[in-house]
């Protein structure tokens, strides 16, 4: 039929004749004839195995169709084949009648998709702008071409189609499946909107898969507002809040550095930890409180629910979001209507607050003409102007009823966001506003899974403590308690050594590696049979030092740098777990003092001016220091808790740091300086021959000498023995005991009070009669005297 039509109008050349086929009647209906090669020609080529452009070139060179091998093969004529059979065909082929010849059955199925820069959520309105990223990976059954590339763009007067994707399959269902996979691998990112997501959703529609479509099918989907798949609502909210919060923080830092660069005094407070974000997504308004726990760590709270997330900036400007143990890639583009997020290839719009009284251009376009008179009344959804966008004329509809006032002249080119006209609303109260969202986040896990192993928990907790000292927010009491539990674990040094050694093992000299492995395995076999075996820090340190001395001097420097992590770990445990805890606490105290000593008894402006001169090549360092100082309240709380739990039992080990703390004389540090002064007084008691009382009665194993793996009954028995030693000690320990009456560790406090009572009244007190009871005023102790077989009750 197509050939007869072309002959009837004397047309010679490549052409496409289009028909509609009725599956009910089996009849064809003519649509149109295109006297050219259409953009969908790869569909024909894939199922017919004919290269149509090559055939056109051959005909143009004077070679008849019947002599082209691919044409002969398609019609099942002898001497057909591919282009490798040209020589044979040119000699042996003979003409044949195309009207009488029957073509072979097409091979498989092919689906084609036009990729356009149109917005399916806005009536397929064309969009234009820069294309930041465009990537597509062709596969054996999926092929595509595009008219733009990454870094290019689509201007407002070009055609909206900029790509074509073709997918082949042995069956229609397989061709559709290959197309869906191909489109999902397509990355389009920039200021334009595309129909890719909408098309993927369309290909999944049952009507399309079952081939039950008709000419009005797509219009009906558009009328029913069938939209492409969106990210889960909580991903949109969390991703939007993190993007807004990080963008706001970056702007605050930029402004602060701008003050410093100009030599001006910046604001006293820099808001980088706490912020509130409001998001308008699909008619719902979400209000989220955002708290930063680190440079990329965030805690989001909404309506008594909370999630924790992390973000990292990618080199291409995107964000990598960690949420609930999964990773998500986020890109954002600012548009006239709001911020469009691309989350894992799916889009959502963070809408700006909509003002229907301002009629704005949503995309670059040309104002062709107004369809109503200036200062006239118009109804909602009434066309008021006509614009040209990408060679198409489109009407603009009024969002509400009112009186219109033109602000733009006809024929004028406009950019997105420009004001076209203003509308005096007939009923401002009738404007639909976003409804506040009253729900909460679903229950989600941590951003990244944290192992239950103590060395990994210790690293995470120590990082949280450092973030508190950097000015970020964490629950200080939980951080300190978790840190104490980790530092007190007998497993900690062994797991830390194993992890560090595993990282360096392949780079260590073979003889050193074998020696360390041999000694460590030998110790492991001993430790399995002994509950009191300690970590062999001195042994491992000695092996490392001996190897350093035995190696060539020219190689010694490189080897020292290589084994430094192992050497530092071994040195920190030379005095047991207590010495390792002391190293940790010293480092945390130094971080605190290195910042706060700058602000002690100095005006903020003077401190910043001095830092401006010191860090003029790295002004961001000043931002970090100021942010750290702003968190002084939580920092003080952290240091006080560490002093009470880890310094109190052995203050002499921290004398230098305590002296520095005691000299802080600003009111911000008054409580801290007082505690440091009290601990300095305690250093005299810690040097008594009877040893440190707090260490002796402490609940933490690191301060005991009876082994790590002592179970509860044995530990209780050991502590009772130490209490008996203090009761009968020949040295005067009464003042030391009284000094511990106000200790923050309630367990230690009870033991101290009981020891004090028994020591004072040892011959007369009934040991089992001592009772402790907590009251709002403090700890109350009661006991009974045994005097001439008469019990008398007393209180303290």
Image (spheres, rainbow, N blue to C red):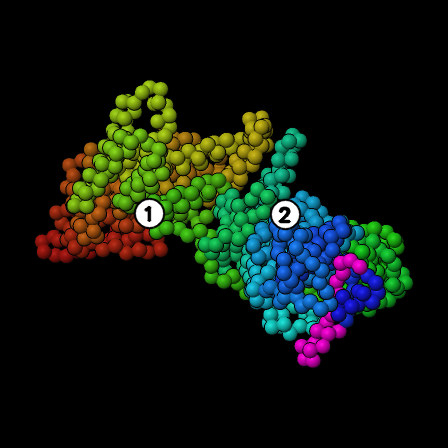
Residue at 62% in and 32% down? 260
The residue tagged 1 is 454
- Which of discs 2 and 1 lies nearer the camera? The answer is 2
- Is 784 on the left or on the right of 453, as rendered? left
Residue closer to the observer: 525 or 463: 525
Mark 1 nearby-residue class (10 Å; few <14, some 14–19, many ≥20) = some
Q: Secondary structure at mark 2?
A: strand
Where on the picture, by quarter, is residue 238?
Answer: bottom right
Q: Mark 2 and mark 1 in contact? Answer it, CB < 8 Å.
A: no
- Magenta residues, start to end: 12-29
Tell me residue 713's x, y (percent): 18, 53
Task: Point out the tag, 2 or 1, that comes first from the N-terminus.
Answer: 2
**What is the distance, in whole Å, between disc 2 and disc 1 at their CAs?**
43 Å
| Residue at image coords 80%, 53% | 365
The reply to whether the magenta stretch includes residue 24 is yes
Q: Residues within 10 Å of mark 2 (few under 14, many from 20)?
A: some
Residue topped by disc 2: 133
């Amino acid at each position: 039929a197509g050939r007869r039509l072309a002959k009837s109008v004397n047309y010679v050349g490549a052409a496409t004749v289009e028909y509609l086929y009725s599956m009910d009647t089996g009849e064809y209906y003519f649509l149109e004839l295109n006297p050219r090669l259409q953009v969908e020609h790869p569909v024909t080529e894939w199922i017919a195995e004919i290269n149509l452009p090559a055939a056109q070139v051959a005909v143009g060179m004077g070679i008849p169709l019947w002599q082209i091998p691919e044409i002969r093969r398609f019609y099942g004529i002898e001497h057909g084949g591919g282009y490798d059979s040209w020589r044979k065909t040119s000699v042996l082929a003979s003409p044949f009648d195309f009207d009488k010849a029957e073509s072979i059955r097409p091979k498989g199925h092919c689906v084609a998709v036009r990729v356009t820069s149109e917005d399916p959520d806005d009536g397929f309105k064309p969009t234009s702008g820069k294309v930041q990223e465009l990537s597509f990976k062709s596969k054996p059954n999926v092929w595509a071409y595009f008219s733009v590339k990454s870094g290019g763009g689509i201007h407002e007067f070009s055609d909206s189609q900029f790509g074509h994707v073709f997918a082949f399959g042995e069956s229609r269902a397989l061709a559709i499946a290959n197309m869906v996979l191909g489109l999902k691998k397509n990355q389009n990112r920039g200021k334009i909107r595309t129909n890719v997501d909408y098309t993927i959703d369309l290909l999944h529609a049952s009507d399309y898969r079952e081939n039950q479509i008709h000419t009005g099918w797509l219009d009906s989907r558009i009328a029913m507002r069938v939209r492409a798949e969106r990210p889960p609502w909580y991903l949109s909210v969390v991703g939007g809040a993190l993007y807004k919060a990080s963008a706001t923080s970056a702007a605050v830092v930029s402004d602060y550095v701008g003050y410093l660069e100009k030599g001006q005094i910046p604001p006293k407070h820099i808001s980088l930890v706490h912020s509130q974000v409001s998001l308008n997504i699909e008619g719902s308004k979400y209000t989220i409180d955002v708290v930063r726990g680190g440079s990329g760590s965030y805690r989001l709270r909404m309506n008594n629910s909370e999630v924790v997330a992390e973000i990292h900036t990618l080199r291409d400007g995107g964000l990598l979001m960690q949420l609930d143990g999964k990773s998500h890639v986020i890109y954002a583009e600012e548009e006239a209507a709001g911020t469009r997020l691309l989350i894992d290839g799916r889009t959502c719009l963070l809408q700006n607050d909509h003002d229907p009284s301002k009629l704005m251009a949503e995309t670059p376009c040309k104002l062709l003409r107004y369809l109503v008179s200036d200062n006239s009344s118009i109804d909602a959804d009434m066309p008021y102007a006509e614009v040209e966008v990408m060679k198409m004329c489109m009407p603009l509809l009024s969002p509400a009823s009112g009186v219109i006032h033109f602000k733009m002249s006809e024929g004028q080119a406009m950019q997105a966001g420009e004001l076209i006209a203003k509308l005096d609303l007939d009923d401002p109260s009738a404007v639909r506003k976003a409804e506040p969202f009253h729900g909460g986040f679903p229950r989600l896990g941590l951003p990244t899974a944290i192992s239950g192993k103590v060395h990994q928990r210790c690293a995470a907790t120590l990082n949280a403590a450092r973030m508190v000292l950097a000015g970020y927010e964490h629950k200080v009491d939980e951080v300190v308690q978790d840190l104490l539990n980790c530092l007190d674990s007998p497993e900690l040094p062994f797991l830390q050594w194993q992890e560090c050694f595993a990282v360096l093992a392949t780079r260590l000299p073979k003889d050193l590696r074998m020696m360390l492995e041999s000694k460590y395995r030998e110790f492991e076999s001993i430790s399995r049979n002994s509950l009191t075996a300690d970590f062999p820090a001195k042994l491992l340190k000695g092996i490392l030092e001996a190897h350093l001395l035995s190696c060539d001097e020219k190689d010694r420097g490189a080897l020292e740098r290589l084994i430094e992590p192992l050497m530092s770990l071994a040195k920190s445990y030379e005095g047991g777990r207590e010495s390792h805890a002391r190293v940790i606490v010293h480092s945390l105290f130094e971080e605190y003092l290195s910042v706060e000593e700058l602000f002690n008894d100095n005006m903020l402006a003077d401190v910043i001016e001095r830092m401006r001169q010191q860090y003029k090549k790295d002004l961001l360092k000043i931002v970090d220091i100021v942010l750290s100082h702003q968190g002084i309240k939580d920092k003080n709380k952290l240091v006080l808790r560490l002093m009470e739990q880890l310094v109190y039992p052995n203050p002499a080990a921290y004398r230098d740091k305590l002296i520095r703390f005691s000299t802080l004389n600003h009111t911000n540090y008054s409580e801290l300086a007082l505690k440091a002064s009290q601990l300095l007084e305690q250093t005299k008691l810690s040097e008594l021959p009877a040893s440190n009382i707090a260490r002796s009665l402490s609940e933490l194993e690191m301060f005991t000498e009876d082994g790590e793996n002592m179970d509860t009954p044995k530990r209780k028995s050991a502590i009772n023995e130490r209490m008996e030693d203090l009761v009968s000690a020949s040295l005067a320990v009464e003042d030391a005991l009284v000094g511990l009456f106000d200790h923050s560790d309630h367990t230690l406090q009870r033991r101290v009070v009981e020891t004090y009572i028994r020591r004072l009244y040892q011959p007369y007190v009934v040991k089992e009669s001592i009772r402790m009871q907590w009251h709002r005023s403090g700890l109350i102790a009661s006991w009974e005297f045994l005097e001439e077989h008469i019990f008398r009750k007393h209180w303290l």
